[in-house]
Image (spheres, rainbow, N blue to C red):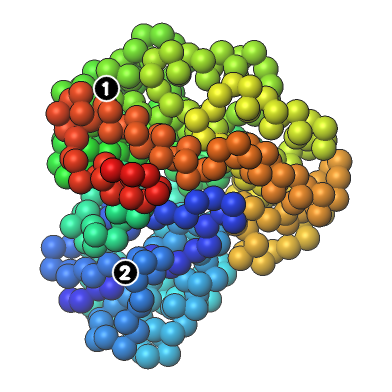
Amino acid sequence: MKFKLIYPKWAKLEKQTEFHLPPHGPVVFAAALPDHVAVEFIDENLEEIPFDDPVDFVGISMMLTIQVKRGWEIADAYRKRGVKVIFGGIATMLHAEETLEHGDAVFLGEAEGRMGKVFSDFSKGDLQPVYDYLNDRPPIEMVGTARRDILNRDLYNYRGVQMVDLVHASRGCRFHCYPCAVAYLGGQVFRPRPIEKAIAEMESIDNNRLFIVDNSLAQDTQWEMDLFREMIPLKKKWCSHPIEDKPEVLDLAARAGAWYVYQAVFDTSDYIRERIRRYHDHGILVEGTILLGLDHHTEDYIKKLVDFLLEIDLDLAEFTILTPFPHTKAFQDLNKQERIFSHNWNDYSADRVVYQPKHMSPERLQELFYDAWDTFYADESQQMKMFKVLQKVVEREKRDNTFRPRKRALAKQAFGRKS
């Protein structure tokens, strides 16, 4: 059976340097497919979709809300050709009812152990409209190594520089943050993979640079330390979401190859200042993630927050605007208060205002968002800051004898530096 798996294109943050990472959801899903299924993967961000090529069945994997309308267009085009389409992925779960109007089936939940039935139903002409496993999660031990062989590896670089590969060591999250849908999607129970399985997958990846995409590694101190301890011999260099703010944890993370972290900067407190300093003391770079437009954000507050980011020497910063994605606390609150004025999912890109802020007009919040990017990168461009982050990983690879010279040459070329 020929199965085509498609990842719809989506617009990147307007002010952000554009690059493309190999998507995680599709390769994890592909690992759950029955052996008799021959899968072809198309990342529409980097490849054209050959709509007229013969195919038995099409799957559309959608991660972000901003992908859904394009995903629906792709499905409509295939269904007009008489090809059945199934949707899956995070954004499918957030927009299931609307998505079902454009597909023959939607798959909700985690795929391990479930795809045999889906493909059996398809073969018998008995495909069900909804496969709902949202609240029936498979044992975490079933999660195997992702099928990265379906990727066209040559496409995933930034101007010739090798990007990170994505991998996960756990699912679920015990936190329930205001703008986040993870509690709905993966549950509020932290579910770590067996460490030996996570380590085996990391070791199997033919790339020295990884992005551990777990929602937060700071959920279980002993597990986190055990994971880092086992990662040390791999000599991988990796980035992640937050690491627990304890000296013994940060020390192990650094020894395990922590390169940089994405750390939410949500106020101008000494706690945040010291948090960033402790990362830096352990040689871990920090990309601050800054969410603008919360109800306590006044114009003056946002300006002071941006000034604070420059004081604490963040290595990079990524600004987004509060976006009320379905099945989040933010959506529930703003929808109840009738403050959401756009349900055009193409506007849900995290860089557009789609609701009425509490202390300013939508237009003013949009202006402050642009000002934040421009102010932070006024003295040094985002590209140059990215180059410095890449320089750091090259230095560490050289110390570990895992450095590939070609990457460095291409990096210099990409950023206009002399060899």
Q: Residue at x 51, y 15 (%)?
A: 277
Amino acid type, mark 2:
Ile
Q: Residue at x 20, y 28 (%)?
A: 398
Q: Residue furthest bottom?
A: 81
Distance, label 2 to label 1, CA atoms, is 33 Å
Q: Which residue is mark 2?
A: 42
Q: Is residue 354 visible?
A: yes
> In x, y percent, where is residue 50?
32, 82
> In x, y percent, where is residue 213?
38, 39
Label 2 SS = strand
Amino acid type, mark 1:
Ala
Q: Nearer the viewer, residue 227 or 207?
A: 207
Could you say which disc has been placed on residue 256 in the image?
A: 1
> In x, y percent, where is residue 60?
39, 68
The quarter of the rendered structure image containing the N terminus is bottom left
> In x, y percent, where is residue 243?
43, 23
Q: Residue furthest top?
A: 247
Q: Residues within 10 Å of mark 2 (few under 14, many from 20)?
A: many
Label 1 SS = loop
Q: Splitting the image into 4 quarters, where does residue 153 fall? A: bottom left
